[in-house]
Amino acid sequence: MVATLALCLLLVFHGRISHVPLKNKFKHETVRESHGDTIKALILYHAADYFVYHGSVIGFQYDLLNQLGKDLHRPVVITIESDPEKAILECFAQNYDIVGIDFNKDLFVPDYIVESEPHSYTYPVLIMRKGMKFDSTAKHIIHASAHYSNQVDLSILDHPELWKLQHDREATAEDLFDMLGDTLIDYAVCNFNVAITMLPFYTNLSLGPTIGKNFPRTWILNKHNRELNDTINQWLRDFKETNKYQNLCLRYLSRHSIIIQSSFGTKKNRISSYDKILQKACERYNLDWKFMSSIIWQESHFSSDVLGMGGSFGIMQMMPVTCARYGITDTSTVEEQIWAGAKYISFLYKIFDGKVDTAEIYNFVAASYNSGPGHILDAMALCKKYGENATHWEKVAEYLALKSHKEYYNDPVVKCGYYPGKHTIHYVEDVMNRYKGYVITKQEE
């Protein structure tokens, strides 16, 4: 353990790992030491592996991990880390079954990390502004992000003696793209899979020549999980032979990807045309507008003329009795519906404030928005009765699902009776996955 820490500290001090603060960082979920049947995975956030597309969270590693769970019949819980330093340290902490991050693994002997079979391949490419003319009389600097450590071969370029690689210790790949676009620098390097995802944001930038060899991208596996690791590696070998894998690569790792080309119109694209109203209403009620945006997408896809089952209507899809409580009718404007929805979500938040883990409270709020708070409070009561921790959503969700069984919905602690909870559990998963994507990818203007 001491040797591992020493190696990591050595990397930090030599600038190979750099803290990169993000304004919108999603905190880690609580990670238990017992892995059980759940596969716990962490991936480093960047647009090639995790982003929000038309309200759905997608990305190469995100989809790959979910396919792994589907094929192995084991749920995969994915945590997103935006700080490369912390993600690399997690490779040694053994808190996860899989850590997906690209860094120079040659620095570490097998005693410290266990690599998976390659899940894909990439290579370094030069990024520059369109129409740039090379000056053969001047020196040129290629800027690399703080944690970029893959080998770059400058001899491939014309006049290699004029080129120099420089690591910018406080810069992310996105920062370098911004600096290029703003003409603060002339050249940068990043991996191909990142480049093709970022370039649609920047119409004045172009993909330059390959400046390094093809190298494998691997997962770091938990060294204590020998049997699971063997299963993961065999799955990777088998899956890479399938058409599904080829389609996944075409979807995310090709410069001709329809998903990538149509995902982004402008760098600071909005969640919806109601962002400003949502920000104002949520500031009034001390809510995260990105969470409320995720709720709205789940309910109505931001359509104001939707009529749902049971008479729910409007952009918030609140039931008639709830709408009446907050003064909303079918003639109310979208802005009035959003303000009423924010007030209602604030009401739900207060029900659970102080009763559940603060980091998980939005899980309970989302569940209550879908089912009504009574059924969630019932599940919490069952959780406590059977000696489980009712402050964590994972356990409460188990008992919410059990409320469809007579033994549980007839229990004296249950006040609201029968409820088919699996739908709400899936609802929460969708809302929270999208919300995590919004938190990481959307910044306040």
Image (spheres, helix red, strand yellow):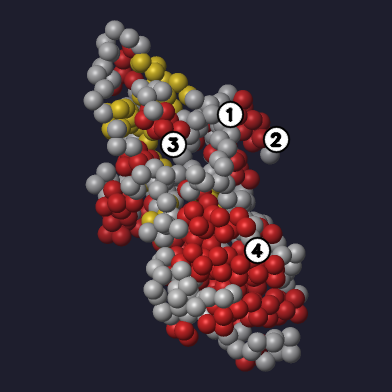
Q: Which of the two labelled residues, at mark 3 and mark 2, occupies the earlier sequence position?
A: 2
| Marks 3/2: CA–CA distance | 34 Å
Tell me if residue 22 comes above or below residue 39 in the rendering.
above
Q: Which of the two labelled residues, at mark 2 and mark 4, occupies the earlier sequence position?
A: 2
Tell me if residue 254 comes above or below residue 125 in the rendering.
below
**Label for residue 361?**
4
**Label for residue 11?**
1
Q: Nearer the viewer, mark 2 or mark 1?
A: 1
Q: Nearer the viewer, mark 2 or mark 4?
A: 4
Residue at 61 percent across and 25 percent down: it is 13
Q: Secondary structure at mark 4?
A: helix
| Marks 1/4: CA–CA distance | 36 Å
Where does label 3 land, which residue?
A: 174
**Label for residue 2?**
2
**Which amino acid lies under the numbered mark 3 shown in the image of this protein?**
Glu
**Which amino acid lies under the numbered mark 2 shown in the image of this protein?**
Val
Mark 3 burial class by Cα count in 10 Å: few <14, some 14-19, many 20+: some
